[in-house]
Amino acid sequence: KQWYQRRVAITAGGEPGVGIKGEAGNNGQDGAAGAKGEQGVEGVEGPRGLVGNKGEQGDVGPVGPQGETGPQGPEGLAGEKGDTGATGPKGDTGADGARGDAGNDGPKGNPGPVGEPGLDGRVLVIDNPKNPAPGFTPEYYIWVELISNVLNNTQIAEKGAPGLDGTDGPQGEKGAQGEKGNAGVDGNDGIDGKDGPAGANGLSGKDGAKGEAGLKGETGPSGSDGESGEKGEKGAPGLKGLGGIKGQKGIQGIDGSKGDQGNPGSCQPNDYSPCNCDTHILVKHSQSLEVPDCPADFESLWSGFSLVFFEGNGYGLSQDLGSAGSCLEQFQLMPFMQCSSSDVCRHGVRTDKSFWLAVEGDADFAVKPMNNIDLIRDHISRCNVCVGTKYILARHSFTAEAPDCPADFSPLWTGYSYVMVTSSGTSGGGQDLSSAGSCLENFFLPTFIECLGRGTCAYYINNLDYWLAQNPETNSPGMWGMGNVYSGLDDIINQGVARCTVCARNTL
């Protein structure tokens, strides 16, 4: 119907104009009501609907009329023995009956609880022509019957004929501009045009930019020798040359004539003055995070970390703190590995241990072992391996005063007499008391820290340090100091631990 609203007038002989699409007109008025249709054909019985939700229990209906007496039912089961009734009146004497068989006494049952009043069993019962499903209530059958009556008795009319067309609506307003149409297909290529006439000559171009430098030319012929220069100043003395190669052994000379009788000798030894042609190693431990300086007339060979001893499989190997082996250039929690005869080596076995000289600090034995390498380094003493021409020895006083050096020896430092360390079990290691390693400049407890093969380091309360004790002259009976206990660093330093001095032999 709407083509009436959208048509466009076409002039005779002219081409169709392009009109603007108008807006949709208003809906027409409703048509007149159609005549009632004929009754439709009864529809096909639909599928059985789903089971509805259980409805609420209805009100109890009125009592129905008395029904007819039904046929006698089958004999019921024998009831339980009832309670003893009241004594009845004395009856007439009956005839002697036949003696029956003795019956078995049944078990006496407990009396059951009193039940609530029941409903009339015939009020809500509806017979279902089909097999009833188990568990369906009487209400369900009421709904089934009601729905069946509605479906069977209700007639559905056919759809009526369409009504008459309504009157045309008013002219709609001008519609909005339509969307842009799709692009058309590209046309065929046109024919190539003919060449035009030659153009006039162009203007002269500007000068080009300066070109890059050319390649280096070949070397020209040598020039003539110049005149001789003036004589230069005398140069500084050159470095000392290398020692010459030792000459071959000469031919043995002729035996000399027998000498004269010598003067009688004396038993006194000649004075001995050591030369500076020998070299000696000295190791110094700072017991801090700073690398110590070498003494005067000694040069540093390397610096590192102060190692005390190793333990592997329960056996210990101590390092004399005065030897170069006690100053490792690299710090590892476990510097060694365990190897067997089966061509297998294991690094970091849990039973392996390393012990390092510690720095000053409060040891908390309750703290969890450290496993951070940077944190562990802050507890390891630094050391320096030095070389010189002076012989080194240590001297111990067994008193609270540092001893003097022997004749022809000069002191390098004074300290405390360190003997040995022990770990758990029988493992441990000691110092050579003549070595500089037995004289530590600082007295710290604990003196060393223990590292395990599992990758942790800590201070353990069962690790022990041993120091030489003071033994001053006294007139007291018995041996002085036996059984004494020194508590606190002040008492230990002032009364307990002995002092020492590291001395170097004077050279020419």
Image: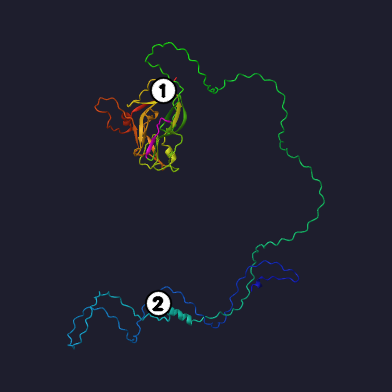
Query: Dot 1, how many residues are within 10 Å of its Cα: few (below 14), some (14-19), or many (20+)?
Result: some
Residue 126 covered by magenta stretch: no
Q: Position of residue 92 (x, y in %)?
A: 17, 88
* Residue identifier under label 2: 139
In this orientation, which residue lies closer to the viewer: 250 or 78? 250
- Tag of residue 505: 1
Q: Quadrant of residue 452?
A: top left
Region in magenta: 314-323
In this orientation, which residue lies closer to the viewer: 211 or 56? 211
Residue type at the position of mark 2: Glu
Viewer-side label of 1, 2: 1
Q: Is residue 83 left or right of residue 433?
A: left
**Between disc 1 and disc 2, whose residue precedes?**
2
Q: Position of residue 170 (x, y in %)?
A: 63, 72
At x 73% / y 28%, what residue is drawn? Answer: 221
- Quarter of the N terminus within the rendering: bottom right
In this orientation, which residue lies closer to the viewer: 242 or 365? 242
Q: Secondary structure at mark 1?
A: strand
Residue type at the position of mark 1: Arg
